[in-house]
Image (cartoon, rainbow, N blue to C red):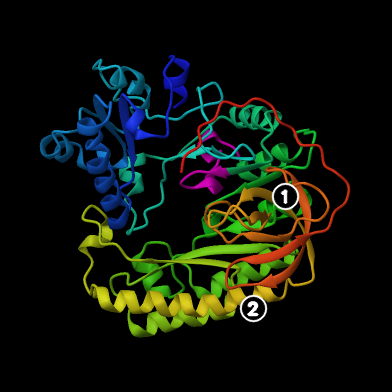
Amino acid sequence: MGQLTSAGHELTPHPSDADVIVVNTCSFIDPAKQESVDTILEMAEYKKTGRAQRLIVAGCLVERYRADIQKNMPEVDAVIGTNELERITALCEGVESAPNPFEPYLYHDLTPRVLATPRHFAYIKIAEGCDHPCTFCVIPQYRGKFRSRRFESVISEATRLFSQGVREINLIGQDTTCFGEDLGMKDGLATLLARLAQIETAQEKWVRFLYCYPNKVTQRLLDTIAEHDALVKYIDMPLQHASAPVLKRMKRGASGDIFLKLIERIRRTIPGVAIRTSMIVGFPGETAQDFETLCQFVQAAQFDRLGVFSYSDEDTSASFALDAKVDARTIYQRKRRLMAVQRKISRARNRALIGQEFPVLVEGPSADSDLVWQARLSTQAPEIDGVCYISDPGDRPLNKGEIRTMRITEAHDYDLTGELIDLAAEPVSRPELVQLSVP
C-alpha cells in the first residue's frame, strides 16, 4: 500500500470503486486457503459488475500454488509472491516486471508504508522467515530462512510511529525471540526492547512483542520486560502441546513439566504478567492419553489466554508423512473439550480482577454497538484477545487512542466490563497520518 500511494495511486476499501483489486492471501492451514480462494472468486465478480480492470493475487497462496492459480483462475491477471513485493506498482499498472530471485524481501524504515490499523496502534515486523524444523509448519517453505531487520531500522520506524501519535507498538515476526542472532547479536530482542522502552514520547506508550519460542525465553529477556514500564507485561508463547511424545513428533522437544517450570519463572520475574499460548489438537499420533496430558497441563498452567487449533494436514509439511492420523470428529471433540477447560480458567482469572484498577487504551465504539465503547488492558493484545467494555465513561468525553484508568466491575468468559474513574484530562495527539481503514 505504501509503494502504491507513493507512486500516486489512491487506495479504497471499497472493491466496487477500485480499478485494480489486490487480494493478499494466506495458505498456512486449510481454512486460510479456503478463505483466500473464496475472496479471490468474490473479488473477481467486480471485474464484471464494478470498475475493476485488473485482479492481482499476492502472498503465501501464490508461493504455494502459483501455477495452479495461473492455470485454473483466468480471472486473475497477475500473481506476486512474498519476495516480490517491489513489483506491486508495476503489476497494478499492467507492466510486467521480472522478479528478483536472489534477494529475499525484508522491508526497512525507509520503505513506504500505510497503516491499516487504527491510528493508536501499529505492528512492526522485526524479522522474516524461520529456521525451526516444526513438522506441522509450512512457513519456512514460503517465507525463507530467518533474517532480522537492522537494529537501528526498527528503532527509527518505532520513533516515527510514536511521533505520529501511535500509542502501542506490537513487534511481530515468525520468530521474534531469535531477533539479531543472524547479525551476531546476543540477547538481541532484550536489547531492542530496552531501547524501544527508552524512546521519549509525549504520552505513555506500550510496547509488546508476539510469538516467543519457548527455549528462546531467556532470563535476560524476562528481566528486561520487568524493568521497563513501557514494556507490557505480556508473554505470547505458543507451546503447541504438553505431551513429550507429541512434541517430539512435532520436532519441538521439551515437555509439560519443563514448560511449567518456565511459566513459574516467568510469573516470578514479571509480577502481573499475562501469558498467552496456543495448542494444536489432533496431531498425528496424539493418543487419548496424550490429550489427557494436555488437558491436565492446561489446568495446571492456568493460562490467561489460550487458543486451540485443529491440526491441519498440509501436503507439503513434514507431518503429512506421519502415521496414526487422528480422525476429524475426534479432533473436533478434543478442541471443544480443551476450550471448555480454558473457558472456566479464563472466567475465574477475570473474576479475580473485579474491583481492581488498570490503565486501558480506549479503542472506540464496539463492533457490536455504537452505543458501547471498548478499551483494552495492556494484557489484552489487539485483534486476538478479549476486550474491556466501558459501562460508565465518567465525566470526561471519550477519545480514541487515549490511555485512561478503568475499575473492573464485571467479568465474562473472555471480556471485562468496567468504569473509567480518572479525572485529569489527558491531551490527545491528533497528527495527520496517512492511513487506510480496513474492515
Which residue has dot 2 on it?
348
Which of the 4 image quadrants contains residue 336? bottom left
Mark 2 closeness class: few <14, some 14–19, many ≥20 residues within 10 Å: some
Identified by mark 1, the residue type is Thr
**Residue 327: which disc?**
none
Closer to the N terminus: mark 2 or mark 1?
A: 1
Quarter of the picture containing the N terminus is: top left
Callout 2–callout 1 Cβ contact below 8 Å:
no
Left or right: 359 in relation to 187: right
Question: Which one is in front in this view, the residue at disc 2 or the one at disc 1?
Answer: 2
The range drawn in magenta is: 171-185
Residue 203 appears in view: yes
Identified by mark 2, the residue type is Ala
Which residue is more in the foreground, 153 or 303? Answer: 303
- State the SS at label 1: helix
Q: Position of residue 92 (x, y in %)?
A: 31, 21
**Residue at the location (61% across, 36% down)?**
119
- State the SS at label 2: helix
Residue furthest to the left in view is: 71
Residue 271 in the magenta stretch? The answer is no
Which residue has dot 1 on it?
224
Residue furthest to the front in view is: 371
